[in-house]
Image (tube, helix red, strand yellow):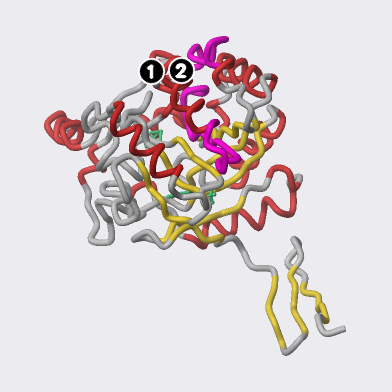
Amino acid sequence: MQDETKLQQVTSKFAVGVTRQIKSSLDKPGIAKQFVPTEQELISKPSELHDPIGDHTYSPIKGIIHRYPDRCLLHPVKVCAVYCRFCFRRETVGKQNTSLTADELENCYEYIRNHPEIWEVILSGGDPLVLSPAKLQQIISKLDQIEHVAVIRLHTRVPIVDSKRINLDLLAVLKQRKPVYMALHMNHPDEFTEPAIAAISQLADAGVVLIGQTVLLRGVNDSTEILGKLFRKMVQHRIKPYYLHHLDRAEGTSHFRTSIETGQKIMAELRGSYSGLCLPEYVLDIPGGAGKSPIGPCYLSKKSSIYEVTNYQGKQFTYNDSD
Ligand SMILES: *Cc1c(COP(=O)(O)O)cnc(C)c1O
Ligand code: SF4
């Protein structure tokens, strides 16, 4: 049994919430563990940070995070449809309803217009799909009109956790001149419920390019079998697994953290037994804001111009790069 007063401390510290749809799947441990608060969240480690990936440092104006030259994040809202217990932005997301005002949004468009190197704009979290289709239409069409913005990407959980929001109005909004990519945050095969599958299929049919984003979580998906099943389901439903994130060091999340060694071992095992389509890139967001780096198992080592390359069975081969 969990201690009620401790749980109250958790809920006063971090946002808690699920949709009706997720509530009806809480009997599945792979889902419950992601959303039901526990007193373990009160455990803080010295290595945990308020701003684990340095969002603040790279925010030139309210609503924009511009870490990499060719792409920036735009955060129109700071709320989500559900609150993941391991959220990397838990210090800022769900704290209050801080949607950008019309003026603030205008400043964001102005910033993007003034930075011709921005080739892609990523609407991120908060979850942009909690906005009404009309509001989203306003934002996306503004971005669509900026000449140098070639690609629009949305990061979201909504199609999986509140599938009914994927309706005809929303699908119409996602049909722009420019390609719209959508990264679906999914961590466990049990998230492929019937309504989620229907929403995914509508999005894919509407021409939205779907990619999958997964966080490696101890006790939820830290096994080759579970992740293999998840990535296969993604591919079967036209979602290309994109990133497997090593868990960021947000406060009160240590009970979800695995070692990098575990992650690498899983990736190496997946490489052997699963289609290449099922393999995401395993990445670490370097604490402080230096960006994401691939941290998957390395198959290559070098002796003068001779490389040693390891195949998926762990066998070593040499490759001469000089002639
Ligand atoms: C993760 C992230 C991106 C997207 O990076 P990709 O490698 O292109 O997926 C962009 N901007 C910021 C600030 C990010 O944290
Ligand atoms: S959907 Fe993303 S931003 Fe929202 S609570 Fe989950 S991890 Fe955090």
Residue that lies at the very extreme toward the left in this rendered image: 5
Name the residue located 32 percent from the left edge and 43 percent from the top edge. Answer: 89
> Mark 1 or mark 2, which is nearer the start of the sequence?
1
Q: Is mark 2 within 8 Å of ligand 2?
A: no
Q: Tell whether position 282 is magenta.
A: no
Within 10 angstroms of label 1, few (less than 14), some, or many (20 or more) residues? some
Residue that lies at the very extreme toward the bottom in this rendered image: 304
Q: Which element is circle 2 on?
A: loop
Residue 217 falls in image quadrant: top left
Q: Quadrant of the C terminus?
A: bottom right
Q: Is residue 253 left or right of residue 283?
A: left
Q: Are marks 2 and 1 in contact (CB under 8 Å)?
A: yes
Residue type, mark 2 in image = Asp
Residue picked out by circle 2 = 162
- How far across and how far down the image is residue 165, in percent? 48, 14
Q: Is residue 150 left or right of residue 277?
A: left
Residues rendered magenta in the picture: 144-170
Name the residue located 36 percent from the left edge and 30 percent from the top edge. Answer: 35
Figure check: 294 above or below 276: below
- How far across and how far down the image is residue 22, in percent? 42, 19
Residue that lies at the very extreme toward the right in this rendered image: 323
Residue type, mark 1 in image = Thr
Residue picked out by circle 1 = 19
- How far across and how far down the image is residue 85, in percent? 33, 37
Q: Is mark 1 within 8 Å of ligand 2?
A: no
Query: Label 2 to label 1, Cα distance in Å?
Result: 6 Å
